[in-house]
Image: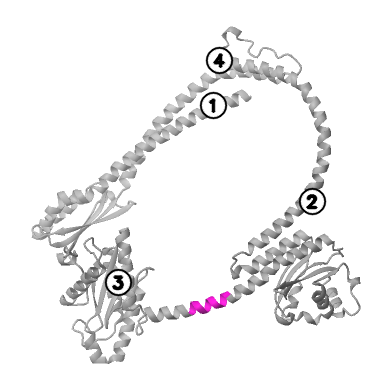
Amino acid sequence: MPARRLTRQLIWQLLLYTLLFGIIATGLKAALVLRDGQRQMDAIPATIANLYLPLLSQSVWDVDIPDIQLQLRLIGQLPGVQNVELRTELGQSLRYDNPAQQNQRNSGEYILPVQTPRSLQAIGTLRLQVSRQHIYDAMWQEVTTSALEFLLGLSGLALLLWRLFNRQLVLPLQQMVEIVHNYQPNAALPALLPDQPHDRLDNELSALARAFHSMSDNINRHLQERQAFENALASHRDQLAELVAERTVELNQLLNFQQLIAGISTRFINIPLRDIDQATNMALGEIGHFMQVERCYLVSFSEEWLVNTVHEWCASGIQPTTHTLLEQSMLQRSWACQQLQHFGLLSLDSLAELPDEAVLEREDLLAHHVQSLFMLRIDHMGHPVGLFGCDMVSRPRNWQPKEQLQARLLGETLANTIIRRQQLQELSRTQQQLHAANADLARMAFSDGLTGIANRRYFDEQLSDCFRQAQSDGSPLSVLQIDIDYFKQFNDSYGHLAGDQCLRQVAQCIQSSLTAEPYLAARVGGEEFGVLLPGCHAEQALLLAETIRHAVWQLAIAHRCSKVNDRVTISIGQASLHPRHHSEHQLVRDADQALYRAKNQGRNQVVVAETPAPPPLSDFPLR
């Protein structure tokens, strides 16, 4: 029954809104649990730094292994900690794994420095693997409990609503539906709520009953008026439909032709050369469908009417033939060329209209099964540049003056296609030559002649740009200064040719180690290289520097005069952008100082620049 379906809809809507409220409430509870758990996880580094690191630092300093293990066990038993590992500067490592937190997902990592109790000198690092799985478990438990409580309440509410709606709404509506269903126009509408006195009907159901009675009276009154209007409108409608049909056909043809011209013209505005062939084929297809022909083609030629480009569209089942004209001169078909040269067009309703001297034209048309054709010469600045034509294969066709006029307009539109193609081809050739020349100039201006990587000039320009960008948007920036250890002795021992080869190998090794797009390697001195790392934090730069140093080591270039090893090695100084860096020169200076320390500490190593001190007053201009 319709009343029962309405009841179900109302009940389901009420339950849906209640369910939505419950979902939002449950989601808020879950979000609170997740927020509290996240705060607890975020507080792990601070908790360890305040409660455990002082005792752990003292134990490491005293080399008290049992106490260190006890501190690691206490840290590892913190909520969310999977394992904790202590690595000292002497290469020692101690680890504790929390068995309750193993095999859990959502792992993260914290690294805390371990310093001496008094001098705050780094004596090791504390690495923690953490998991947020316990947060998600608590959140899931909260969601499950809330959902079960809500479902129980929702079930009771649904039962109560169902009983209430059945009693107050379903039975009265069923009575009204039965009466209205059996009602016939031009008859009095009986009482819609016969079981209830009229003096007690003061709700929406009574208002609905009164509305039905009023509607019944209006229907009966308007039926007669409607019949009279319908008879008059039918007569006028038939007359108007005939006039509209006639004008619609004419307007549609004109509108379609205007849209066709506008679409073709718009398609070739600012079109690139690579798309012009596809656009021309699409335009020919649209023209062919509009003209209702079976073959439509556009031919362009150069001097002496030599065909150099052919575009053709064929209806389904029709074979393309115009491509056979490529690299041929249209002057070979003397009669057709005379018609095109003198009149600008060639129109044949049937092959019987061909004169006797058009022997070659007749042979071509018979070979291609053409029964009727229309061909138009396309000119540009008084010179012929192409042909536009349409063929009929299945039957002859009488080309009407209106169709010939439309073909002329389409041919003038397609003339721009040929000219546009020629202009784009010439422009493309000029742009390719210019691009090649600019590329050669750029390579000569910004590359090192020996190694092939960037030179000092390009490195300085990019460093200045990256420094300004990093200061404006707060992004990280790191610089590496690299020097080949004992390279002068290498040159003296093996000769300058071998030294040049060594420089090339080291440069290419550094270049191949830079996997990110914006990273830049450059030769900034004789045996010195610079690496610019925009967007790279200090930790990432240190890891990359070690990768480069190890890669050069793997080259295994023999160096018998090195005091480090029997192969070529490099020393690297690393510096990262700090708020106290006021210019790119200070950043490079810190990297150079780190490189100097790497050499003094034995070479073949990476040294990170210390936190820069405040600049002296001399660095600031006096006001």
Q: Residue 223: give its label.
A: none
Amino acid on which disc 3 is placed: Thr
The span from disc 1 to disc 3 (Cα, nearest Å) is: 68 Å
What is the x, y in percent for residue 579? 23, 60
> Would you place residue 89 above or below residue 149 in this image?
below
Q: Nearer the viewer, mark 4 or mark 2?
A: 2
Left or right: 560 with respect to 328? Answer: left
Confirm whether the magenta stretch covers residue 434: yes
Q: Residue 203: give its label.
A: 4
Tag 3 or tag 2, which sits nearer the N-term?
Answer: 2
Amino acid on which disc 4 is placed: Asn
Q: Which residues are magenta?
A: 427-436
Amino acid on which disc 1 is placed: Leu
Q: Residue furthest front?
A: 623
Could you tell me if the residues under marks 4 and 2 are in contact, i.e. CB atoms within 8 Å?
no
Prevailing secondary structure of the magenta residues: helix
> Would you place residue 284 above or below residue 435 in this image?
above
Tag 2 or tag 4, which sits nearer the N-term?
Answer: 4
Mark 1 Cα within 10 Å, few/some/many (few <14, many 20+)?
some
- For the point 76% across and 54% down, the residue is 254
What is the x, y in percent for residue 505? 33, 82
Left or right: 203 with respect to 215? Answer: left
Q: Which residue is mark 2?
A: 250
Left or right: 92 with respect to 502? Answer: left
What is the x, y in percent for residue 344? 79, 72
Q: Which residue is mark 1?
A: 10
